[in-house]
Amino acid sequence: MTRHAEGTFDVKTTPLPADDATMGTLIGRYSLVKQFHGDLDATSKGEMLSAGEPSSGNAGYVAIEQVTGTLHGHTGSFALQHIGVMEGGGYKLSVAVVPGSGTAQLSGIAGTLTITIAAGKHSYTFEYTLPSQQ
């Protein structure tokens, strides 16, 4: 059975120094720290790589974050994988639970998270499943 969660989140991105893989490229590297509120009461930490010219409306990013907390009363952690493309001012974003990343009461979790940014505020909707015994 698919479940639905929603709420808001705060995010802080901090530039990281280039590593051997990105040195000498136009790839930006950032740390991510988030605080989720609502049905998902959690924190997350991760990394993001980006490229392109966001000021012109053309860019892309990938990210992985580890989310730890409580989702509708189930405690544990899971990883989210982001793939985003912005082109001509429009954007396509996919955020999915990494298969096999769930722990504790969130073991076996699967799903997709939708991010909405309006008036500078971030919110999410999360459609997910857990194994039937949970």
Image: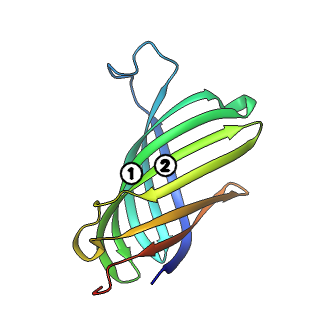
Left or right: where does residue 122 sit relative to residue 13? right
- From the viewer's perspective, is residue 103 above or below residue 5? above
Q: Give the residue pinned by disc 2.
A: 82
Front one among 15 and 6:
6
Question: Percent from the top left, x then y, of residue 19?
Answer: 34, 22
Badge 1 crowding class, 10 Å Cα cut-off, few under 14, some 14 to 19, many 20 or more, is many
Looking at this view, name the residue that lies furthest to the left.
104
Of marks 2 and 1, which one's residue comes earlier in the chain?
1
Residue type (three-letter) at the residue carrying disc 1: Glu
Question: Percent from the top left, x then y, of residue 3?
Answer: 48, 81
Question: Percent from the top left, x then y, of residue 67?
Answer: 36, 60
**Residue drawn at 61 percent across, 27 percent down:** 52
Left or right: where does residue 4 sit relative to residue 133? right
User: What separation in Å lies between label 2 and label 1 (alpha carbons)?
Assistant: 8 Å
Instruction: Please say if the residues under marks 2 and 1 sit with CB atoms less than 8 Å apart.
Output: yes
Q: Give the residue pinned by disc 1.
A: 65
Q: Marks 2 and 1: which is nearer the front?
A: 2
Question: Percent from the top left, x then y, of residue 84?
Answer: 57, 44
Label 2 residue SS? strand
**Residue drawn at 30 percent across, 73 percent down:** 106
Quadrant of the rendered structure where residue 116 is? bottom right
Looking at this view, name the residue that lies furthest to the top.
24
| Colour setup of the view | rainbow
